[in-house]
Image (spheres, coloured by chain):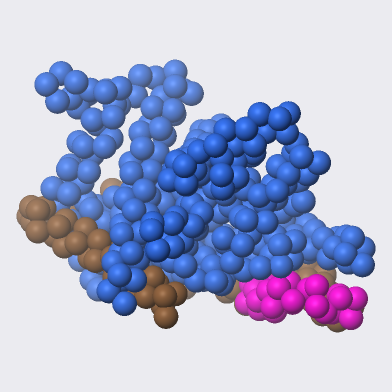
Chain colours: A blue, B brown
Amino acid sequence: MLTLILISAVKALIVVAMVLNLAGILGWVERKGSALIQDRIGANRAAIFGFAGAGLVNTLLADPIKFLTKEDVIPRGVDRLLHTLAPCVSLFPAMVAFAVVPFGDRLHVGELVVNLQAIEVDVGVLFLLAMTSLGVYGVVLGGWASNNRLSLLGGIRGSAQMISYELAMGLGVVAVVLTYGSLDFQEIVRRQGHMIGGWIPSWGILYQPLAFLLLLIAGIAETKRAPFDLPEGESEIVSGYFTEYSGIKYLMFFMTDFVEIAIVSAVVTTFFFGGWQIPFLGSQGFVFPWGWSLALPHVVVVLLQVAAYMVKVFVFCCLQVLVRWSMPRLRYDQLMWFGWKVMLPLGLANLVVTALVLLWVRG
Amino acid sequence: MQQSISVLVTFVLVGGLVAVMVSLGWLLGPRTETPAKGEAFECGNPPSGSAWGRFPVKFYMTAIIFIIFDVEVVFLYPWAVLFDRLGWFGFAEMLVFLTVLGFGLLYVWQKGALEWD
């Protein structure tokens, strides 16, 4: 009992540390990356003893300290409880949702078998959808509690956008569940372990390319970033639903953004790019189809798989940053048109075709 | 048991982290209130009354339609997990269900509930 709690706590700590570090590094990638794209220098001022680390000191140290020591302004006429609750309701489900995605295979330590998944429920996919759906409450509460017209506009825009794209996301996920016949993330990842014809890894992208696109696009829409950043829409409604926030609460909304990017990347990786799987790496080590093999100890294999998962997640995070800084913002009618009249029918069609093909293949 | 423990432990940890963040900001930040700072920000103009008023009914429509289709997706999950066991019969049943809802989608589409101007 005590060991169970201890193991769970350690795994939860690892995942929380992972996602917080990822959010910090992504902040740096975004600032320096956007500078690179727009031909600027970007963050370079904050330094410790003259060491600026290409802006790393700025984004990883100076910014959080500054946010923490800023005044937490709560305007008059605001619903104080909801105003404070909104950033918490926004950040909490995002971080919990990240914890349900497995970051490695089972680790054997003596007699103990540790499943490298912080929240090891066997209906992980449902858990993930439930938690990501809760994210909309942060947006609505923030927009409503602020007692500001611009915030309210941002809040209702955001909620309508998030629920519209949630449908396409849900349908994409159903197609994946249909393909693997399981709601367990670990099971889904293990099913992607074998090789087709000995050479090609059987990753989900080969079976569900359309679902991959649907999930990625709907995921970016759920994170409310460009080209889907209408809830924030700086040039129209100041900052949208977090106009009236400052200090640490503002930072929490910001972190939610980055954590959501990490979730989208983690889910895409797990469903379509083999999660922690590395091609040709079995439980005993590498076995290549051209005859070479390399035996590795168990711990090294597990560590390699964790590293592979993190690299894949990071690549997709960078892809989303690149998308954000390359795409102009959609118009609201275009956004709704795309969500309801393109993504939703495509998701339904993909589902029916998947079911037909499965029936045909499996008899 | 193991499942519930892992959920609970993660909830406590993340909840604690969020609570610590909010209270740290409250503890470390200065507090100076001025009349101008307490106003709602409306691009420099004095705010014209409360924001808690009416907003376009379109958003309400979207929410209602969303619930219909979201419940549809929820019904699809158990079907997807048991798909192999249900076979052609399950597929036909789900196709009927999807067709009915597909007509629903066509109807709201025709009625213009998905149009934004």
Give the mark count: 0
In the foreground, A262 or A333: A262
Q: Quadrant of the N terminus of chain A?
A: bottom left
- The residue under the point 34% across, 24% down is A42
- Left or right, B107 with respect to B54, comes to right
Residue B4 in view of the camera: yes
In the foreground, A43 or A52: A52
- The residue under the point 30% across, 22% down is A54
- Left or right, A246 with respect to A42, comes to left
Residue A19 image point, x, y percent: 38, 50
- Left or right, A144 with respect to A218, comes to left
Asked which quadrant contains residue A347, the reply is: bottom right
- Is B109 in the magenta? no
- The residue under the point 41% across, 24% down is A35
In the foreground, B104 or A178: A178
The correct choice, above or below, for A203 with respect to B52 in the image is above
Residue B103 image point, x, y percent: 84, 74
Residue A116 image point, x, y percent: 45, 57
The correct choice, above or below, for A299 with respect to B93 in the image is above
- The residue under the point 75% across, 52% down is A208
In the foreground, A4 or A119: A4
Residue A318 image point, x, y percent: 50, 36
Start-end of magenta stretch: B65-91
Residue B41 in view of the camera: no
Q: Quadrant of the C terminus of chain A?
A: bottom right
Q: Main secondary structure of the magenta part?
A: helix
